[in-house]
Image (spheres, rainbow, N blue to C red):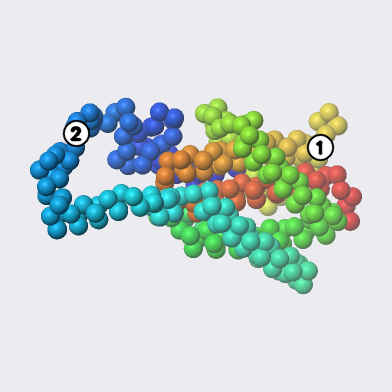
Amino acid sequence: MANPVMNSIVKDWSAQSQTPAGYPTMPGYQPAAQQAPNPYGGQANPYETQQGQAYGQQGAYGDQMASYEAMMNAPAADAVDRGRMTYDDVVVKSLMCFGLLVAGAVVGWMAGVIVPALAMVTALGLCAVTLGLGLFVRFSKKVRPGAIIAYSLLEGFVLGALSFAFETLYPGVVVLAVLATLIVIGVTLAAFSFGFVRNSKTLTRVAFLGSTAFAIYYGISFVLGVTGTVDMTMVRNIQVFGIPLGVIIGLFAVFIGVLCLVRDFDAVKVGVNAGVPEKYSWLCTFAIMTDVIWIYLELLKILSYFMRRN
């Protein structure tokens, strides 16, 4: 779903003045057109007068000028030196968090093999824990790398246990879901990189409304299913022009997930161009990871409709 964390940090970045290119700026920045003119523009440097040259020939002052000249000739500090977010920061943290997610998934899968019932109960309990961690990351006034790392591991266990349950019922569905997820992510990233898709106010609005609707829908479905009020399996199997309603809902959910990924990629680009602090790369990673998980789960459910039940 549209990640509220990404919406929050982009709002923080946009609170500052805007550059002519439309990118948010850091506190204290002023576009060049708004800056006061240089009082020395078009004038000779007063330190290059004959008097200044005379002083430059003296020992102490000459040493200071030499030191200043060396400093000015030194290479400029890059984004890492200044503590600003870079694409490498997001890539490295994403690889680390997804690695932890996979490690947790392996544990969850093995738990499903050894003690299936206990694994599912544990996974359901951890769903509440990961939801709490997600809200903590969202509403905390500070960036919480430890909470994001913990979320990666625990959510990985949940995915592993759920994936094992689906694999038991529909052999081969997990491999197809993983491949489909990688294809969706790769195509989305390539389309964004080459400018075939762009973030916009309309896209953001659709992603927000769609994800909010799905959050409400799944919340109601969970309550109705747990209480036994409605058999949600029968509801999802209702045919619409010969297509199960669950497939139609799932495809729309994947579409919303793709819009959210475009939003994530654009926010990373904006953050790097704006020179936001390096710590925000953790939040960008968290946003991308949660949207990838969302897409994987939806594809897993969609593919289960076309797999033979064991």
The residue at which mark 1 appears reads as 244
The reply to whether discs 2 and 1 touch (Cβ–Cβ < 8 Å) is: no
Element at badge 2? loop
Horizontal and vertical percent position of residue 299: 74, 45
Give the camera-side residue of 283 and 272.
272
Which corner quadrant of the image does residue 217 belong to?
top right
The residue at which mark 2 appears reads as 44
Horizontal and vertical percent position of residue 234: 79, 42
Which corner quadrant of the image does residue 310 belong to?
bottom right
Residue at x 55%, y 57% (from the top left corner):
93
Residue at x 54%, y 29% (from the top left corner):
200
Asked if residue 2 shows in the view, the reply is no
Horizontal and vertical percent position of residue 238: 80, 36
Query: Three-letter amino acid code at disc 2?
Result: Ala
Q: Label 2 to label 1, Cα distance in Å?
A: 78 Å
Give the camera-side residue of 154 and 270.
270
> Is 285 left or right of 16, judged from the image as shown?
right
**Which numbered dot is residue 253?**
none
Horizontal and vertical percent position of residue 89: 51, 53
Asked if residue 65 shows in the view, the reply is yes
Residue at x 52%, y 58% (from the top left corner):
148
Give the camera-side residue of 275 and 197.
275
Residue at x 41%, y 36% (from the top left corner):
24
Which corner quadrant of the image does residue 130 belong to?
bottom right
> Residue lying furthest bottom in this view?
114
